[in-house]
Image (cartoon, rainbow, N blue to C red):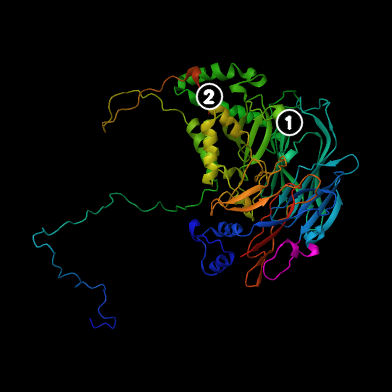
Amino acid sequence: MGSSLGGWPSYNPQNFSQVVPADPSAQPLNVIPATYIATHRTDPPPGQVITTDPKNILLRHFYQKSEEKLRPKRAAPDNLTPQNNGKQPRGPVADGGGQASGRS
Amino acid sequence: MAPSFFRTANLASRVFDRQFLSPRPGTAVNTVRQLYENLVPSYTIYDIDCPDYSFRKFTDDGKYLVAFSRNHQDLIVYRPIWPTFSCNDACDSNDLPPKAKKFDSFFKQLYSISLASSNEYICKDFFLYMECHQFGLFATSTAQSNDSTATEGAIHGVPSIEKITFYLVRLEDGVILDEKAFRNDFINLAHSIGAYLYEDLLCIVSLRYQTIHVLQIRDSGNLVEVRKIGAFCQEDDELFLHSHGQAARGVSFLPGIKQRLLSYIFRKTWNEESDQSLRVQHLKKKFYFHFQDYVDLIIWKGAYNMIVEQVQFLDRHHLFIKFGSVDGGVSRSTEQNLAFFAVYNMETTDIVSLYQNSSEELYSLFEYFYDHFHANPQNSSHGNFISSHSNNFHALDQLRAIKNKASSSSQFVKKMMASLPYTCQSQSPSPYFDLSLFRYDEKLISAIDRHRHCTEHPIKFISVNQPNVVKFKIKPAPAAHMACIVSTDGVLVGLTLEIILYTSKEMIKNIPASFRSNLPMHRMNSRY
């Protein structure tokens, strides 16, 4: 366009409008990339503040593992009919009784 | 800096590169440490007349050399000073000036102070350094008496020492800032096991009274007790109990820390039974029925009957406590008997988790996150760069090799767990021990501050960057020679162009090697 830079690539809608496919028999590609539109609000919750966990990674692991152990095991469900999504619920947890492992 | 296989061996070239190549973000210290590949001990001076003291250790920042008098009563502190000289063309040993053969050229005595009085002795093995204020913590004790008369609160089987005193000394001028005494107590002072310094917090384990004392070192140098864990977990527990007249009624409460242990086991047992209606029954069967057993005997594989053996900080609020046996605590026996490890939150007074010493889960945390057992944010020098199996492939390979060769997995795990809790300041941060820079025989010498047999053969340090190239050797002197290792600070570098560059402390931070005192003196000199 008369630029002193001598016609270097620039954002110009005319660019590539005259492109002729090298292979004339090829089908023109009209693939429109699929776009994803969220069906829910993706805004962060109001007043959210993200901070760094002061616990170092070793301590985080200690807490995480102890939480796993102290969380009550999943109780046996009362009804065993399949859920709507077709998934089978887990079977009842084996009776721990006196076999509680002393090992952590 | 360039990848390792491009690292040039020429020091001048590396210094010039450093002028225009900045290190990757966060790797400034690693980059500086790499320069020690070029600055290695190259010379040994024997038969130096040293003062007749017991040289203990260099501080990690290289500013002080700590020594004790032979009678274990005085503390002598030196300032390492480095003589400089220059020479034309190639220097060899005959060109050393006479001053290079004098102890005083390398070390300047700052002061000698008396720490221990007549019947007390300085514990040579105990020394902790607080780098930010240049405070040193020392300990003196009277002789150990083996007849432990039962005192209230003391547990059986632990000997009693009439008086153990901790001294906080400002190393700059030798002023004793504060002291704290423990009477008729027993604290394991060997290798500083009984204490742990984290930032400005110091915890001291009283084995005899099963109490963890947490003290704060104030900027002024005062030692202030902030917490006492054992009989009571919270500061106001004692007040609460007294005010409610419980003590008067003669009802004895379980020591606070054991309360915590019990409640942890309680919660774990409670959660084992998922059915609500069965829970109470399960609890009755497992917990309450055996409650008295729990108190008196061994339950849960012995967790309850054990004593607090050693403690370390994991951060300002969490302690890592080893529950072991009385023998283990007093004499540090290497037998891997049953032991437990607990993570204790000092704020909430809860036990976060409890592991047996054969726990695979704890071992996996040990394998991946070992550095976090000794990380200390206040390390301004290279304390956070000590090689371990968690940050170095070679060390990890060695660990895995031992693991694969071990006949019993649980014995292997117990053996590894014997190194926990970490012993404060027990490893030298010297770049010469950095496994990414040098290889050496770890049976002969290593970063861990431990007595070793003096060997006849020279200890070779081989470069990792240039395999099979022996960078330097340390030749242990025969016992008759009195000498010590010196560290690098203000290293003299000579170029073949006859230009002497003096690399100041600012260019290369000093990392001293804390070798034992029966090794020969080295002068640092490197020529390219």
Q: Which residues are magenta?
A: B81-99
- Can residue B378 be seen here? The reply is no
Q: CA distance from mark 2 to mark 1?
A: 34 Å
Query: What is the chief secondary structure element of the magenta stretch?
Result: loop
Number of other residues with Cα within 10 Å of mark 2, as a class: few under 14, some 14 to 19, many 20 or more: some
Q: Residue at x 48, y 18 (%)?
A: A97
Which type of secondary structure does the marked residue at label 2 adopt? helix
Residue sitting farthest toward the left: A25
Q: Position of residue B237 (x, y in %)?
A: 69, 35
Q: Which residue lies under the disc numbered 2?
A: B269
Nearest the camera: B20 or B349?
B20
Whichever of callouts 2 and 1 sits on the residue coming sooner in the sequence is: 2
Quadrant housing residue B78: bottom right
What mark, if any, has residue B144 been given in the picture?
none
Q: Position of residue B408 (x, y in %)?
A: 54, 26
Which type of secondary structure does the marked residue at label 1 adopt? helix
Nearest the camera: B435 or B138?
B435
Quadrant housing residue B288: top right
Q: Which residue lies under the disc numbered 1?
A: B331
